[in-house]
Image (spheres, rainbow, N blue to C red):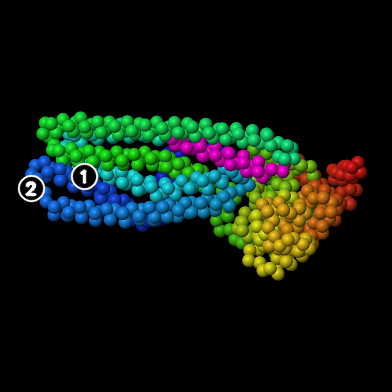
Amino acid sequence: MQKTHSQPSRTLIRRFWPYLAKYRHIVALDLFCAALTTLCEMVLPLIMRYITNAAMTDLSLLSAGIILRLGAVYLALRVIDGAANFFMADMGHVMGVYVETDMRRDAFDHLQKLSDAYYSNTKVGQIMGRITNDLFDVTEFSHHCPEEFFIAGLKITVSFIILCRTSVALTLILFACVPLMAGVSMLLNGRLKGAFRRQRQQIGELNARIEDSLLGERVVKAFAAEELEKEKFEQGNRAFQDIKKKTYVYMAAFQTSTRMFDGLMYLVVIVAGGLFLVYGQIGPGDLVAYMLYVTTLIATIRRIVEFAEQFQRGMTGIERFFEIMDADVDIFDEPGAAGLKVTAGAITLEDVSFEYPDDHNKVLRHVNLAVRPGERLALVGPSGGGKTTLCSLIPRFYDVTGGRILIDGQDIRSVTLKSLREAIGIVQQDVYLFSGSVRENIAYGKPGATDAEIEQAARLAGAHEFISQLKDGYDTYVGERGVKLSGGQKQRLSIARVFLKNPPLLILDEATSALDNESELLVGKSLEALAHGRTTLTIAHRLTTIQHADRILVLGKEGIEEEGTHEELLARRGVYYRLWNGILEGAAAG
């Protein structure tokens, strides 16, 4: 993944706000309840000041009735406080879940639009971390961020007004500590944010390492490389440990500085408040109220300190979320794009050139090609000649950097991606089966297909017989990536999937090159049935599989070097002839 610069918190909050604004009615109710809980809490010092001042000046001002009425008022406030707090704890968190769900949906939707180039340069473990763990922290952030800052601002404001009415001088001395505290907090907060960001990046790397090792566990065992994998994991694990240690140093410094400022504020009240009391500038009840309000302020500051870690985790999660959302969508529908209408199935490449965007490696140069409707065209040539690249341009996995590609006269960039890709069936060498049943994997070619349609597709692909012999037939669990099936079985399921899709255009990307001879024969028959009546492009590594193609193209560094039928190319005794005889000699030597 490309490195990105850290975004300022103000920018991140501005970009995050639309997600929160969607649930502004819940936010408004949450803040209203926060105001109620705050006001209920702020009344207690006033009650205590009244009782203390009355007791010190004239005890006759107090009576059992007055005390009971004050108690009843305070009890009512506590009931209100409890109800408001319940709403905050319940709906406030639910709102956070709503926001998290919306963000995860948007991230997943955006990931579906990104081109192959993005996934070629990004580790899956990093992506998984960004749309799962990182967004967990956003749930708490969404709820607590507006709530905590609103409560803190309200308490500080109300406390300041009430205390100023008692003693402006003492209040100003007390609040003089706040700017200094804010400055130190901002400094340490910045370091915390950087530490949390490094922590998230490293856990993404660790996840990617674990995923890589577990998915390749057979290769690890085959090479007896367990110790090597343990060493790689230990390096990543230790790096994560070191980052977390530094994070906790900043957290400890943050918490320690806050405790020191707590003590400083108490010291101001004790010394300055005591002197004001001695010189008769405030009363005993006022000093008690001051101490209670300072205790409230300190509790508020501690909540903000405790929230600071959560805040920075949330900001880091939001930042990493927007790094996904900021990834450019290279392949998209042009304005006014219409649905593709395949009438015959002709494919035309006009002066097509292509270079990969990340390394600017020029693969195709000024290629011109006309594939006739229903033609079976084979592409052969040395590795790096552009066979797979050419076929990847047709469904727009990449966009051409020069020229254009047309299907039945329609520029593929002027039609919708959905209609274009629905018209193309692709069978690849590296078959991907989803974790689920055989039935679910075949039905991927046509969501909502009936059991009869699924079975018919399996029969056409030559897969029904082996499926019937499986333990649970079409309901058999195939395992992650289809690990419970053989290579030939997986390939026939992928062919059944395309049969069910029934596209007019077909791309076969070395679909049999990784199979044994028996599986290749079975799959070859299925592919022949699939290609019947369809415009078909076949990328071949084994030349014996494309002898009967209508036309064969030999692709090299200079583009199309030769073309013709199998017999015509052999008669020319050129590149294809050498490739063919090299294969035959290799087979004879074997």
- Which mark's residue is nearer the viewer, 1 or 2? 2
Q: Which SS class for mark 2?
A: helix
Q: For residue 522, which quarter of the picture?
A: bottom right
Report the front residue among 64 and 48. 64
Name the side, left or right, on which 313 lies relative to 444: left
Report the front residue among 161 and 257. 257
| Highlighted range, magenta | 191-219
Q: Is residue 536 visible?
A: no
- The alpha-carbon separation of the residues under discs 1 and 2 comes to 21 Å
Quadrant of the image for the N terminus? top right
Q: Residue at x 31, y 46 (%)?
A: 151
Chief secondary structure of the magenta portion: helix
Q: Which SS class for mark 1?
A: helix
* In magenta segment, residue 298: no
Quadrant of the image for the C terminus? top right
Look at the picture and state if 280 lies above or below 508: above
Q: Is residue 430 visible?
A: yes
Q: Amino acid at mark 1?
A: Pro
Q: Amino acid at mark 2?
A: Ser
Crowdedness near tag 2: few (<14), some (14–19) or many (≥20) residues, C-alpha within 10 Å:
few
Q: Which residue is mark 1?
A: 45
Report the front residue among 499 and 215. 215
Residue 422 image point, x, y percent: 65, 60
Q: Which residue is mark 2?
A: 60
Crowdedness near tag 1: few (<14), some (14–19) or many (≥20) residues, C-alpha within 10 Å:
some
Residue 76 image point, x, y percent: 24, 56
Q: Residue at x 26, y 33 (%)?
A: 265
